[in-house]
Image (cartoon, helix red, strand yellow):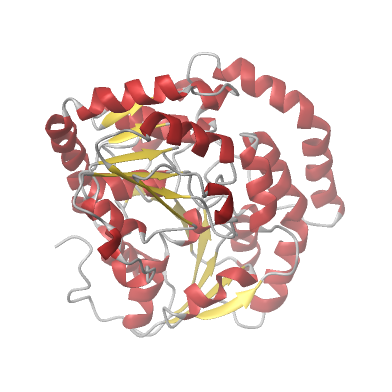
Amino acid sequence: MCGAAGAAPAYRMANIVFLSVPAWGHLNPVLPIISELVRRGHRVTVFDEPPFAAAVEATGARFVAYPKAISMEDMSAVLMRGDLMATFELFLRGTTTLYRFCLSQLVDDIPNVLVIDGIALWGEMLGRRLTVPTVVTSPFFAYEINRNSAPGEFAHNLGLFARVFPQLVWGWIRIALNGVYLLPLHWPLLPMRGNLTMMLTSKEVHPPSPIFRDKRWEFAGAMIDERTRPEQFDFSKLDGRPIIYVSLGTLIFAKSDFYERCMEALGDYPAQVLLSAGRGTDLSRFGHAPANFIVAESFPQLDVLRRACLFVTPAGLNSMHEALWFGVPMVAVPQQFEQLHNAEAMERGGAGTVLDREAFGHKVTPDELRAAIDKVWADLDGYRSRAARLGETLRTAGGYAAAATRIEEMARY
């Protein structure tokens, strides 16, 4: 069964290092892989920012904190603006520091295999420097601007690119001036490339592309293991009405005006609405929430989606996968173009509908949101069936147990 930690081939213990980035949407998908590799007896080390230490150590892996270079708050600030170009500039700025730190940590304890997040530029460079096998795990689609662009996306991104172009050029120059010459040269630039580049989605969900003819690309499906997600919620607060779940995710969450529009759109809806306002949010500002709303900093998303009838989401890939896993239809309100591509793939599969205005910097109105929810609600069984069909492709692609096996196969002994 996909995702089950069943019998695995016998491998010698390997030294496996994961280079993550400071975002739950990037760490959560690899936690099940890490946990499975630890269970199989491997020595696993994970590099990330300090706030992620507890989640990593709960798997049994060793945690190493990056020096201050890129933080979750930095990523949140640029993504709140929907500015993917600024995100890349942020990673360029931190690359030299992170590359040198990781090299100093690993040069005397070279791993058998290096597992690199798809946006960890320093990881691809480090793999070349250490000449070890590398596996890239990409929790996002390959970003081919021309092939998969939405109408108007190229012009919008061109304006953003022009604004950050001097910083991007200086970022590349600064890396070279620091003696780091192993810059990745491939298109699309993201994800990074390894000896194996593992897309953490299914081929059926991802937009088609000729780049996947290369055997160094593989689709591994969704990485979902509830044992790595220990969040709790008192479900006795639910009163039996259908559940609508609203969440903007773990990075793009501090948009109180969006939540206000959700309240206006759904305050009289015949459903109970669970609104995730984001970790660290002052919940007192939601004291006026309608009676059918429950507002919390966060919810155990997998447990909620198991019960939900509808998910209002920006369509970050992991949240979208989790909804499809449980066959939950979506109303997607993407906040930037990466999410828009995810949402369009979901819509093509018939699992929901998309409101794309916010990706272009405009606000979706309460009436537009209500109309989209009504559209899906009117054919909930049909949308649920199509969502479950896409979810099945995420299961049959392999899951975390198969991903762990591929990493083992890439390890040198």
Give the left or right position of residue 83, taking residue 26 as reference: right
* Res 365 seen here: yes
The N terminus lies in which quarter of the figure?
A: bottom left
107 versus 282 height, above or below: below
Where is residue 283 drawn, in percent x and y? 55, 55
Please provide percent x and percent y for residue 295: 44, 52
Q: Residue at x 34, y 30 (%)?
A: 345
- Choose between 261 and 172: the one closer to the eye: 261
Residue drawn at x 72%, y 55% is 95
On screen, residue 134 above or below 342: below
In depth, the one of 373 and 267 nearer the eye is: 267
Q: Residue at x 26, y 40 (%)?
A: 271
Left or right of 140 on screen, residue 87: right
Image point (28%, 63%), residue name: 235
**Residue 50 rendering spot, x and y as whole percentages:** 63, 72
| Residue 382 falls left or right of residue 61 | left
Specify the farthest residue to the right.
177
- 80, 401: nearer the viewer: 80
Tell me how many marks there are: 0
Q: Position of residue 117 (x, y in %)?
A: 52, 56
Q: Is residue 226 left or right of residue 158?
A: left
Q: Quadrant of the C terminus?
A: bottom left
Identify the image quadrant of residue 88.
top right
Q: Is residue 10 above or below residue 163?
A: below
Is any atom of residue 217 visible in this view? Answer: no
